[in-house]
Image: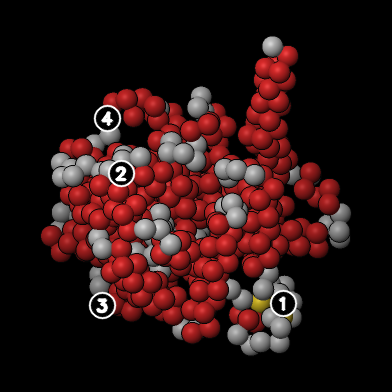
Amino acid sequence: MFGQLADGFLALADPVTFLYLVGGFLLGIVFGAIPGLTATLAIALLLPFTFGMKVADALVMVAGIYMAGIYAGSITGITLNIPGAPSGAITTIEGNALMKRGEGVQALGVSALSSAIGGLIGTVVLISLAQPVSSLALLFQTPDKFSLVLLAIVTVTIVSQGSLLKAAVAMAIGLMISTVGMDPMAPVGRFDFDSYHLIEGVGLLPAVIGLFAICEMIAQSGIPAKLVQGVAAGQVARPRRRDFIPRREQLRQIGIWNSVKSSVIGVVIGMLPGGGASMASFIAYADAKRGSKHPEQYGKGSYEGLAASESANNAMCGGAVIPLLTMGIPGDAVTAIIFGVLLIHGLVPGPALLGANFPLIAPMFAALFVASIFVFLSVLAFGPVYLRLSQINRGFLYAFIGLISMVGVYASSFSIFQMWMALAIGVLAYFLRRFGYPVVPALMGVILGPYFEEFLRRSLIVSEGDPTIFLRSPASVVLLVMTAAFVWFLRIRPARLAAAAAKKGEGA
C-alpha cells in the first residue's frame, strides 16, 4: 500500500498532473473566497470537463479545489466580514474582530497555518486509517446522528456572544426556515402558502448569501465611508510576506494541542454523513472555548478560537473522503459531486474500491496532502492581495459582491424566486443584527434543521414513539452527556461564578 502511495506522489511529478493540481487549487481559492461561489459549485461546473481527462488528473484537480475552497471561505470573512462559504462563519467572528483591531495580517496568517495543519492531519488519517476508521462511522445509527446534530445546535447557541435568549431565538428562526417546502418523509408541502415557488424550500446558498452578504451590504451602506477607511488604514500599509508568518507568542497562545484536537474533531465529524465543515468548525470552536484559559476573549478576536475553527474545517476534508471511498457514502456536498467524478471514470466507491484500484486513487491522497501545504504557501504569495480587499472602493466592491452573489444563487437553483428569497433573508438578518440577535445561529439552524428533523423522526418511527431510544446507544448517551457538559461549562457555571463574584463584591 505504501509503495502504491509513493507512486501517487510520484504522479504529481508529471508536469501536466501538477498543473491540474495548481489550477484546481487556484480555482478553489477564487470560488471559495467569493460569496455565492463555493467549492461545490466549482467541482459541479468542472464535472462535464472531466470526461476527457485522465482519472488521475481529474481526481487531483477536484482534490485541489476541495482543500482550497474550504480554506478560502475565511479570506473575505476576515477582511470583509462576509464568509465566502458557510464553513467560514466562525472564522468571520474572530478574524474580522482581529481585522478591526489592526491585526488582519496576523489573522490571515494564523488562519492559513491552522488550515494547513488541519488538512495535513486529516489527509494522514485518511491515508493510514481509511478502512479501519470507516467502520466507526458504520456504528453510528440514526439516534446517534440525532444526538450529534443536537450537540451542534446547542453548542452553536450557547457559544454565541450576548444574550442566550436572543441566540436561541435566532437558532429557532433558522430551524423554522429549514422546514419550509416539501416534507422530507411524506409528499406534502409545508408552510408553502400554496406557492409552487415555496414548495422547493429555501436553499442553503440563498440563506448564506442573505444572512451574510446582503445583510453586510445593507449594514455597511449606513456606515460613513471615513469609518470604513479608518479600519482599512489600521492595517500594515505595505505588509511583507514574512509578516503573514504567525509569531511565536501567537503560536504559544494557540497551542499545538488545540490545533491537533480540533483537527481530530474535524476528521471525526467529516466521517459522519451530513457532518460537513460547518458542524466541524462549530463543535471544535465550542470545545476550544470550553477548555480555554481565556474564554472571555472568544468573539472579540481570539487567535485560539480562529485556529480551532480553521483546523477543524480543513481536517474535515480527509474525514469526508473516508466514507465516500470505503462505503460509497458521501460525507458532504462536495464529496457527493466527487462521487460523480469517480463514476464517470468507471470507479464505483465501496469496500472493493481501494483494494482493486488503489493506484488510481493514490494521486488524490497525494494531492490533498500537497494542497494542504499550498494553503499556507498561498497566504505568503497572495496575502497582501487578500488584505487589499478591505481597501477597495466600498461602492465598487459591494456592487461586485452583490452581483456575484446573485449570479451564484441563480446558478445553484436556476430560480429567480431564490434570488428574491436571498434578498428577503438579507433584510431580515439586518434587523436581527440591529436589535442584537446573532445571525450565525440562524445560519446553523438552516444547515442543521433538515438533519435534526429527519434523524428525530426516523428514530421515533423505529421506536414507535419511545424517546428512550436515544438512551439505548452508548454513542448517543456520550453525545448527550457532552451536550449537557457544554451547557454547564459554557453557560451555567460561568453565570454562577459571576453571580457569586458580584454578591461577594456587594458584601465587601
**Of circles 3 and 4, which is in front?**
4
Q: Secondary structure at mark 4?
A: loop
**Of circles 1 and 2, which is in front?**
2
Q: Secondary structure at mark 1?
A: loop
Instruction: Using a 10 Å C-alpha cutoff, classify the residue at mark 1 as few (fewer than 14 neighbours), some (14 to 19) or many (20 or more).
Output: some
**Cα distance in 3D space between marks 2 and 3:** 42 Å
The mark nearer the N terminus, 2 or 3, is 3
Q: Which residue is mark 4?
A: 247
Instruction: Using a 10 Å C-alpha cutoff, classify the residue at mark 4 as few (fewer than 14 neighbours), some (14 to 19) or many (20 or more).
Output: few
Q: Which residue is mark 1?
A: 191
**Cα distance in 3D space between marks 3 and 1:** 45 Å
Q: Which residue is mark 3?
A: 52
Q: Is residue 275 left or right of residue 236?
A: right
Residue 389 placed where, x, y %? 27, 57
Q: Amino acid at mark 1?
A: Phe
The mark nearer the N terminus, 1 or 2, is 2
Residue 189 placed where, x, y %? 71, 80
The mark nearer the N terminus, 3 or 4, is 3
Instruction: Using a 10 Å C-alpha cutoff, classify the residue at mark 3 as few (fewer than 14 neighbours), some (14 to 19) or many (20 or more).
Output: few
